[in-house]
Amino acid sequence: MEKILIIEDDADLAETCRRLFRRAGYDAQAVYDGGEGLERLAADPDLSIILTDLRMPGMDGTEVLQRAKQIRPEVDVVIMTGYGTIQNAIQAMKIGATDYITKPFDRHELLRVVSQILEARSLRREVGRLREELRSTFGFANLIGRCPAMLRVFSQIQAACSHESSVLIVGETGTGKELVARAIHYNGARRDRAFVPVNCGAIPRDLIENELFGHARGAFTGATSETIGLFRAADRGTLFLDELAEMPLETQSKLLRVLEDRRIRRVGETGETEIDVRFLAAMGLTPDEAIGKGKLRGDLFFRVGVITIELPPLRERGEDLALLTQHFLEKFNRVFPRRIDAVAPAAMDLLAAYEWPGNVRELEHVIEALFAMGTSERIEAEQLPARVRSAGSRTGGTAVGPSTPAAPEAARQMEVPDTLSDAEQRAIQDALRVAKGNKSRAAALLGISRTRLYKKIRDYGLADDEVPE
Ligand SMILES: Nc1ncnc2c1ncn2[C@@H]1O[C@H](COP(=O)(O)OP(=O)(O)OP(=O)(O)O)[C@@H](O)[C@H]1O
Ligand SMILES: [Mg+2]
């Protein structure tokens, strides 16, 4: 609970105030000089509101205010002042007092000032909490990845957060382009402003300029009202131009001019308006492909792609597959009433062998579907969609059944890098070797319980010769 401190050299008045607040349900204390008040403030982190008299022997109210702000910048200080010193109270407001109140005071006025401050404090806390929440939703915490290509992406995002250059994000569908764009916005200086996504492929060609630039009333037949346009909607914030290569080439050249001049002219208007927008863009083609196919203007690319972030396809992300699988299990365990806590090794091998044309989004959907329809607490190979199951048998001449123990070999032949379960299996074998087959020691080495180790040996189907007793 937030506490109130009254600093007032007139002891009777101080007590009256204190009692008034107490009766209204506040935790209030009173002291009779500034020095003592500051000591209390320093000692009590819950003390958040100070009401101080202005004219006091020794330290006056202005000094109390200044020192209190040094001790705790977020403290609210209300100056209590007699009629003759209002000018000083106004001065105090300029150096950081939250409010002032004139003596003799009306008790309602006193309570109103304090309750207003408390309300503002709780709003500030709520806004702070919401911002934190947004930051953690779109911050790096939600972008899972540990493979070298993703580590590079993270460092590019970090760099992109600290300046204002345009960024082009490229990657196949479902690789997380929009997630990266949001991470850049929500971790950068414009985080408290709008993030405006535009899917350039979804807006009809003849409407796109209208959407982007807006139009004045009467600009064309049917333009009965005016629109501000997306550039201006994103003013002081970030405009995310998704599917940039789907934007008509004429519009691309207009966009280039906006990027260069930072000014726009609405359709049907003569004057230009300055805009302060950060541009992020994304597309599914690589810049070479897009320019080669005549879908992206080279000059626009040089302007937009000052920094180009390339997102790797899921099939090239190695151990990230297991990491992402775990992440989505955790996510859907929070959403669905049932629990799935593990992936059978055979199922993991299939996931590793599959191509994932829809990348992370496809993986997310596969796992979500298992939550929606599956029944077991572990994802089994046979529960996976047919396209994923057949992946294990598409490995050229060395066709293997989807759930045979040979599946890890298949994954390796396809040069799918290690999965987490491969690494785990190897760690178990190494530990058993070092412990000379003593399972209690091996378990201790691995930092897991003996029962857990037995279960893993069983799950991985480790043969007896690999597991010396
Ligand atoms: N690295 C990642 N970590 C966690 N989730 C991810 C990651 N990458 C993508 N996702 C999830 O995958 C889904 C697709 O991501 P997103 O929409 O950002 O992809 P995209 O590249 O914009 O796809 P498209 O080209 O189809 O628009 C989202 O639900 C996103 O949360
Ligand atoms: Mg997208």
Image: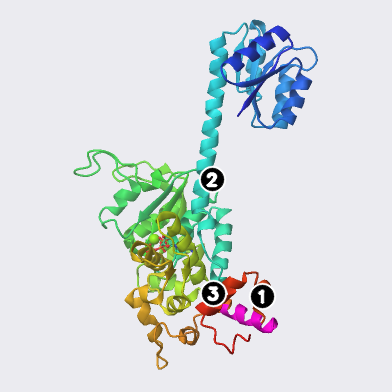
Q: Earlier in the sequence, mark 3 or mark 1?
A: 1
Q: Earlier in the sequence, mark 3 or mark 2?
A: 2
Q: Amino acid at mark 2?
A: Glu
Residue matched to label 1: 440
Residue matched to label 3: 455
- Quadrant for ligand 2 reads bottom left
Q: Secondary structure at mark 2?
A: helix
**As displayed, is residue 109 above or below residue 305?**
above
**As displayed, is residue 54 above or below residue 233?**
above
Question: Which image quadrant: the C terminus?
Answer: bottom right
Stretch of the chain drawn in magenta: 425-437
> How far from the left and from the top, in percent, is residue 323?
52, 67
> How far from the left and from the top, in percent, is residue 221?
19, 44
Residue matched to label 2: 132
- Camera-near label (1 vs 2) is 1
Side of 33 relative to 221 (left or right): right
Magenta stretch containing residue 426, yes or no?
yes
From the viewer's side, name the closer residue of 206 and 8. Answer: 8
Q: Main secondary structure of the magenta part?
A: helix
Q: Quadrant of residue 171?
A: bottom left
Q: Secondary structure at mark 1?
A: helix
